[in-house]
């Protein structure tokens, strides 16, 4: 049995765009044609490939097919470049989906993408998630590569260290004077509000435990965007673990341990010149900003 690349690409378009109607606009065919292609592929494989929700959601079988579709598109792009068609202006632009944690995106990740975009016909599709969860997007076929804290490679992927993103507990000066007038003590930390990124973020909790304080019951604000998170700390909304590259005048360090998050680059284990070029540019920027592992 063979999977028709056109049908696989149609499934990828459905999940990328969220609905069959949106996929039809991207593929420039009718919604009925999209539905017929999906039905033909599901009948051929004898599997349900996508849950018809809004947005559309892949089944486990659908994830495998989308992974294949993206790999074919990547290898086809490399082949067209290899035969020189890109120099004649005939090569299609390629979409490269990547997963990255919010703090990396806010501090160092976008600069290498801008450089890559200036020299290659790439459309980057960034998926933001916590560094502890980005590897899951590789498994599902949603992305081709990811910045992740996981050093064990996902099946079918290679992994390389990027560097260490360091976080220090910081607070705005007036906030620190109000809440920590007698020092950053366990008693003061149990009362002082802090800023949490979201309910999966554990950095503030780890630091509190290291300071002898249970995070349960400590007042907190949720600010689920990296730039806004750092701004909230600078404005005195609460104290928080701020990435070293985002430290700014007006913030004071609260002491305690510096938390170090080791970041890795995981990508599909394919012989792809384009994917390798992306990896090299990102690794170069990571070494410049994050330093050696």
Image (cartoon, rainbow, N blue to C red):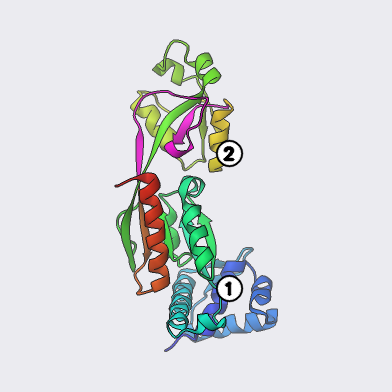
In the image, taking residue 55 as reference, residue 166 lies left or right, namely left
Residue, x 52% and y 20% (percent of image)?
Answer: 173
Residue, x 57% and y 32% (percent of image)?
Answer: 232
In the image, taking residue 260 as reference, residue 180 lies left or right, namely right
Residue in the foreground of this view, choosing between 60 and 14: 14
Query: Residue 166 appears in which quarter of the rendering?
Result: top left
Mark 2 or mark 1: which comes first in sequence?
1
Q: Which residues are magenta?
A: 237-262
In the image, taking residue 199 as reference, residue 33 lies left or right, namely right
- Residue 217 visible in the displayed image: no
Residue 270, percent across and down? 36, 73
Q: Which mark is residue 228?
A: 2
For numbered disc 1, what is the local secondary structure?
Answer: helix
Quadrant of the image containing the N terminus: bottom left
Residue 17, percent across and down? 62, 68
Eyeballing the image, is 17 above or below 45? above
- Assess whether residue 43 is covered by the magenta stretch: no
Residue, x 50% and y 40% (percent of image)?
Answer: 199
Residue, x 50% and y 47% (percent of image)?
Answer: 102
Outermost bottom residue? 1
Residue in the foreground of this view, choosing between 109 and 58: 109
Q: Which mark is residue 206?
A: none
Do residues under tags 2 and 1 come within 8 Å of each other at their CB atoms?
A: no
Eyeballing the image, is 222 above or below 129? above
Disc 2 to disc 1, C-alpha distance: 32 Å
Eyeballing the image, is 104 above or below 160? above
For numbered disc 2, what is the local secondary structure?
Answer: helix
Comparing labels 2 and 1, the label whose residue is closer to the camera: 2
For label 1, the residue is 13
């Amino acid at each position: 049995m063979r999977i028709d690349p056109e049908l696989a690409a149609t499934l990828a378009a459905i999940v990328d765009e969220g609905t069959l109607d949106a996929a039809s606009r991207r593929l420039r065919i009718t919604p009925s044609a999209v539905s017929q292609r999906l039905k033909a592929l599901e009948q051929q494989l004898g599997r349900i490939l996508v849950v018809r929700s809004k947005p559309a959601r892949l089944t486990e079988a659908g994830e495998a097919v989308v992974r294949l579709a993206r790999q074919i598109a990547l290898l086809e792009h490399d082949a067209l470049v290899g035969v020189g068609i890109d120099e004649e202006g005939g090569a299609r632009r390629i979409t490269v989906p990547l997963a990255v944690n919010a703090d990396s995106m806010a501090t160092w990740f976008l600069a290498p993408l801008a450089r890559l975009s200036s020299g290659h016909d790439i459309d980057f599709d960034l998926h933001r998630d916590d560094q502890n969860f980005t590897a899951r997007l590789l498994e599902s076929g949603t992305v081709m590569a990811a910045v992740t804290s996981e050093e064990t490679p996902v099946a079918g992927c290679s992994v390389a260290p990027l560097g260490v993103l360091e976080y220090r507990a910081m607070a705005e000066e007036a906030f620190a004077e109000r809440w920590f007038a007698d020092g950053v003590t366990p008693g003061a930390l149990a009362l002082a509000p802090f800023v949490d990124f979201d309910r999966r973020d554990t950095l503030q909790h780890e630091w509190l435990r290291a300071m002898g304080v249970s995070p349960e019951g400590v007042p907190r604000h949720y600010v689920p965007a990296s730039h806004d998170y750092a701004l909230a700390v600078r404005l005195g909304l609460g104290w928080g673990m701020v990435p070293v590259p985002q430290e700014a005048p007006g913030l004071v360090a609260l002491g305690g341990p510096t938390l170090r998050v080791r970041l890795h680059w995981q990508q599909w284990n394919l012989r792809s010149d384009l994917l390798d070029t992306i990896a090299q540019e990102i690794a170069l920027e990571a070494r410049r900003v994050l330093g050696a592992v």
